Amino acid sequence: MPGCHLDTQKRFCDAQTIVSHQNNVYINNLLWAVEGDLDTHCDQWALVACYGAQNVYINNIKVICAVGDCAEPDFFACFVYHPPSKTRPKEHSTDTWVYR
């Protein structure tokens, strides 16, 4: 089972997720990331729910899990390309999971 990916947690490209599409569901005192949230690499490219059953929503937006979910390709410092696998969520809740 994948863990819930949360606000400020890292992705494989070392960016941090910025939760901005929901403000009412917390896991371990951090907002749970949802599809469309961005990262700290120039606030570019959105997280995409592409793993698991994809049947868990917050405010009608699919949730993000780590390590399985995807992201659009990232441009570090707005000019260095990261392939999609490098932008996937890396960190996650260690005691809350999704898609059992």
Image (cartoon, rainbow, N blue to C red):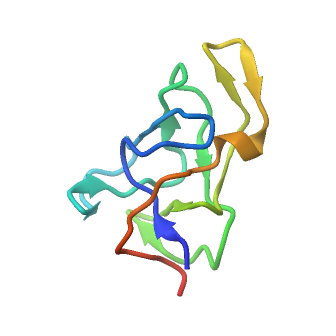
Q: Of 29 and 54, which appears nearest the observer? A: 29
Q: Is residue 55 left or right of residue 52?
A: left
Could you say which quadrant of the image residue 73 lies in? top right
Q: Nearer the viewer, residue 13 or 23?
A: 13
In the depicted structure, whether residue 43 falls above or below residue 72: above
Q: Residue at x 44, y 76 (%)?
A: 97
> Where residue 62 sits: x, y (%)?
52, 63
In the depicted structure, whether residue 93 falls above or below residue 36: below
Indicate whether 88 appears above or below 4. above
Q: How many marks?
A: 0
For residue 36, side relative to residue 85 (left or right): left
Residue 46: percent from left, percent from top: 59, 40
The quarter holding residue 19 reads top left
Residue located 36% across and 46% down the image: 7
Residue 49 falls in image quadrant: bottom right
Residue under the image location 71 percent in, 12 percent down: 79
Residue at the extreme left = 29
User: Image point 55% across, 34% down: which residue?
Assistant: 14
